[in-house]
Amino acid sequence: MRVLRRGDAGEDVAEIRSMLVSLGLLKAIGETGGQVGFDHEVESAVRGFQQRRGLITDGVVGPATYQTLRGATYHLGSRPLAFLISSPVHGDDVFALQDRLTELGYDAGRPDGLFGSRTEKALRSFQRDYGLVIDGICGPATVRALRQLSPRARGGRPVLLREQEQVRQAGPRLRGKRIVIDPGHGGGDLGVEVSGVRESELVWDLARRLEGRMKATGMEALISRGPDHGPSEAQRAAFANEAGADLFLSLHCDANSSPHAQGVATFHFGNGYGTTSTVGELLAGYIQRELAARTGLLDCRTHAKTWEILRLTRCPAVRIEIGYLTNPNDRARMSDPAFRDVVAEGILVAVKRLYLLGEGDQPTGTFTFADVLAHELAKAE
């Protein structure tokens, strides 16, 4: 599909309007007396939808917004659901299925609206236990059974408990943990480029500095791309999944039309409806606090998003936006190798804090690389 924005018209715009109307985000043409087209009202409705769904809030309908918008029009039972490797099924009906299976005690993983192998496995287990045909397809009979067994008591966060237990069982030591470091962009995609400073080159250098520190602690650090390669977000997530990563860290710098925009922000998976990667959210908080304290960059906080790089990665994933290259001060600081060393140390310490689970921890900004190494050696003895 073509990217749609204010001023566009045609059948594809009419489809967008129709979906927004069905979701109650836009009034029908007959109610407004307006013209069929991508006008200010449509743009406002799209922005509202994007904000609620953890998408980039730009009022433009690109592939990600269209897929999420289309998926929002489905409810559980409106179509058969199955695991399709070549064309994964995505939508609110898949989210409802995952949520229902989780409530019934089946591990469908983090509810993300994407019908994957883990969802299929949980569905097959349910079908077997309920005496249904075990085909991994959520059709009318399976939907009826799911509704009949809907629990009387709701609440709790089983996904939270599972993720926390995985971190607890992993232990406080960093040795043996497998981390994928993902320097953004690459190849022909330079990312943000201002006054000869290129995002892809800065984050590649930062990734190498972080890799060295992680390997020194005994961690297995993998970089998602080479210096001249720019894989898609789906390919980066697939790399982490195939590697069996414990954590995924995506490194970026930001940009804005205003040179006054500045600071550091971190992002984790969350759909705006209470579903989140709980460990990802915890790690994002640790990273955000460490970097804000160590660098003095403006604290732009942590945010839940449904970006592919966060949604498709099975392990907890965090994207870090370190400074605005369109801001002279942020750009100058990120251009300094010594500053990138500070950032790398802050990220490493944040990962260590995650696995410590609050035991033997130190105040934010005071835990050093030497402290981490000493802690690892002490545990080894």
Image (cartoon, grey):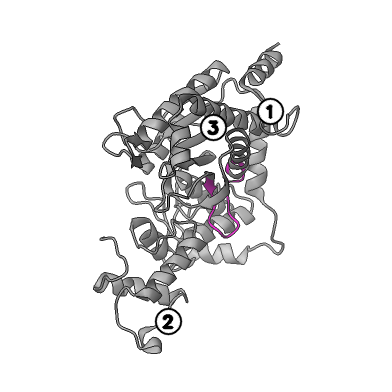
In the picture as drawn, the residue positioned furthest to the top comes out as 381
User: Which residue type carries mark 1?
Assistant: Thr
What's the mark number on residue 27? 2
Q: In this view of the protein, which residue sits in the foreground, 256 or 309? A: 256
Quadrant of res 42: bottom left
Left or right of 19 in this view: 165: right
Span of residues in magenta? 267-280
Provide residue 197's location: percent of width, then percent of height: 35, 35
Quadrant of res 360: top right
The residue carrying mark 1 is: 366
Image vertical order of residue 80 relative to residue 265, above or below: below
Q: Residue at x 61, y 45 (%)?
A: 278
The residue carrying mark 3 is: 246
Provide residue 85's location: percent of width, then percent of height: 36, 46
Provide residue 11's location: percent of width, then percent of height: 25, 73
Report, in whole angstroms, how far the alpha carbon at label 3 lies from the one at label 1. Answer: 25 Å
What's the mark number on residue 260? none
